[in-house]
């Protein structure tokens, strides 16, 4: 069956360090992959999209990689700040209108 | 950026009653709207997809007679949870899509439903 896996354990890092979150998927051939931020009790906010023919995408302190052979995406936040503390969701879209989400990884950045 | 609102943000109701949740795109017309449900520490699960003026397409396992979706206009979709039960307690999130790519999909702030 189709599955998106994100590390269910929270990630705790010190302010200023780089946070790296992992998203693995099986039985999909996504046309693109997205990362969202979700704060408690709020809806997701779109951060970045990377297409299947792109290896890496950057936006300010954010970087996403996409390895279609490994079926994995890595999401990096450099120079992390306490305000980056949130749940980060990986999502896949196979080219249609459906977006399928992972359960998310909770990030805590300590000052 | 585009804004999607939901009303109410929280609702508590008694078992057996029906609850209506509104989703509005405030500054754009949405070609498609989506309804998701999210249980604590779980992923958003797509419930249904709707286009203005046509019947919603429900995901497998979602009862269309229990979760009534009305997409009355390009800026408004409603989800009615009929005869709600405690197991329907969840976080309901709508989203609206303005273009073709997933980056044009904007999410509402969610509605927390608690059924007693």
Image (spheres, rainbow, N blue to C red):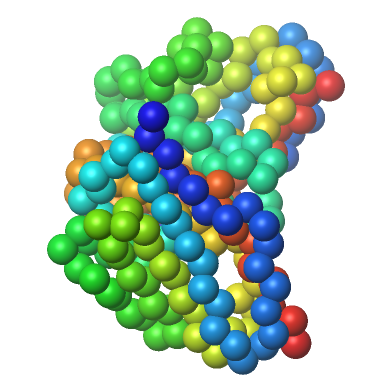
| Residue A34 in the image, given as x and y percentages of width and height | 36, 58
Q: Is residue A44 visible?
A: no
Q: Residue furthest front?
A: A70
Q: Which quadrant of the figure has residue B18?
A: top right
Tell me the quarter of the image containing the C terminus of chain A. bottom right
Residue B65 vs residue A94, the one in the foreground: A94
| Residue B25 in the image, given as x and y percentages of width and height | 41, 47
Q: Which quadrant of the figure has residue B96?
A: top left
**Is B87 placed above or below B45 here?**
above
Q: Residue furthest right?
A: B116
| A61 lies left or right of A32 | right
| Residue A89 in the image, given as x and y percentages of width and height | 50, 56
Q: Is residue B79 visible?
A: yes
* Picture residue at 45% right of the left edge, 22% below the top: B69
**Is A90 placed above or below A21 here?**
above
| B112 lies left or right of A65 | right
């Amino acid at each position: 069956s189709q599955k998106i896996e994100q590390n269910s354990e929270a990630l705790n890092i010190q302010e200023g360090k780089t946070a790296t979150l992992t998203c693995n998927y099986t039985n999909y051939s996504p046309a693109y992959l997205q990362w969202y931020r979700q704060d408690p009790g709020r809806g997701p906010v779109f951060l970045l999209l990377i297409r299947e023919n792109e290896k890496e995408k950057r936006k300010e302190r954010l970087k996403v990689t996409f390895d279609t052979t490994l079926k994995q995406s890595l999401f990096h936040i450099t120079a992390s700040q306490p305000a980056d503390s949130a749940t980060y969701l990986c999502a896949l879209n196979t080219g249609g209108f459906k977006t399928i989400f992972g359960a998310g990884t909770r990030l805590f950045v300590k000052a | 950026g585009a804004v999607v609102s939901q009303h109410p943000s929280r609702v508590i109701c008694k078992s057996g009653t029906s609850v209506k949740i509104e989703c509005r795109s405030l500054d754009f017309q949405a070609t498609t709207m989506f309804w998701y449900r999210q249980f604590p520490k779980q992923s958003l699960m797509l419930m249904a997809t709707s286009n203005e003026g046509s019947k919603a397409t429900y995901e497998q396992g979602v009862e269309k007679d229990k979760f009534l979706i009305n997409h009355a206009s390009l800026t408004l979709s409603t989800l009615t949870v009929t005869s709600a039960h405690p197991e329907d307690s969840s976080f309901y999130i709508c989203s609206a899509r303005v273009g073709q790519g997933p980056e044009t999909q904007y999410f509402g702030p969610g509605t927390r439903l608690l059924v007693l």
